[in-house]
Image (cartoon, rainbow, N blue to C red):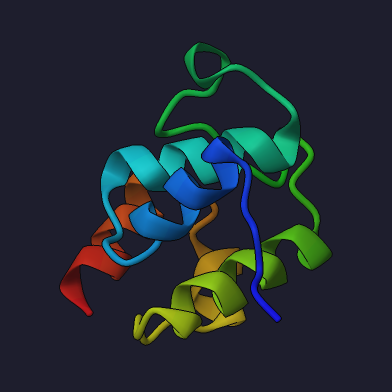
Amino acid sequence: MSIQYSNNEAAAEADSQYLTLQLVRQQVAELLDEELSDIDDNENLIDKGLDSIRIMSLVEKWRSIGVDITFMKLVKRPTISNWWSLLSSS
């Protein structure tokens, strides 16, 4: 049995091997159902509508590619710029 991906899913799967600031922005924007241009890197994502379930989905996604991150670290500093500092240092 083989798994078939659409072009977008295949690209996302390939991109998930390497975490970049742009990919973090894109993943957050998708979870918020927002355009990238509508989210500022220093904006509080919880105030923007990102709930705990969506944050946990990011934690699991990032852990699956080897990033050492916890839910609590993200919740304490809920901005893309803070998250990128945490993610890029681990």
Q: Quadrant of residue 72?
A: bottom right
Residue occupying the far left of the picture:
89
Locate the N terminus by quadrant. Answer: bottom right
Q: Is residue 58 left or right of residue 68?
A: right
Q: Quadrant of residue 22?
A: top left
Of residue 56 and residue 42, the one placed in the foreground of this image is 56
Q: Residue at x 67, y 63 (%)?
A: 55
Number of labelled discs? Answer: 0
Relative to 75, residue 47 above or below: above
Instruction: Kindly tell me whether residue 29 is visible in this rendering.
Output: yes
User: Residue 51: x, y in percent?
Assistant: 80, 55
Relative to 15, residue 90 above or below: below
Q: Residue at x 48, y 83 (%)?
A: 64
Residue occupying the far top of the picture:
37
User: Residue 45: x, y in percent?
Assistant: 62, 42
Q: Residue at x 82, y 66 (%)?
A: 53
Relative to 2, residue 37 above or below: above
User: Residue 89: x, y in percent?
Assistant: 17, 72
Of residue 20 and residue 40, the one placed in the foreground of this image is 20
Of residue 6 and residue 61, the one placed in the foreground of this image is 6
Locate the C terminus by quadrant. Answer: bottom left
Instruction: Kindly tell me whether residue 44 is visible in this rendering.
Output: no
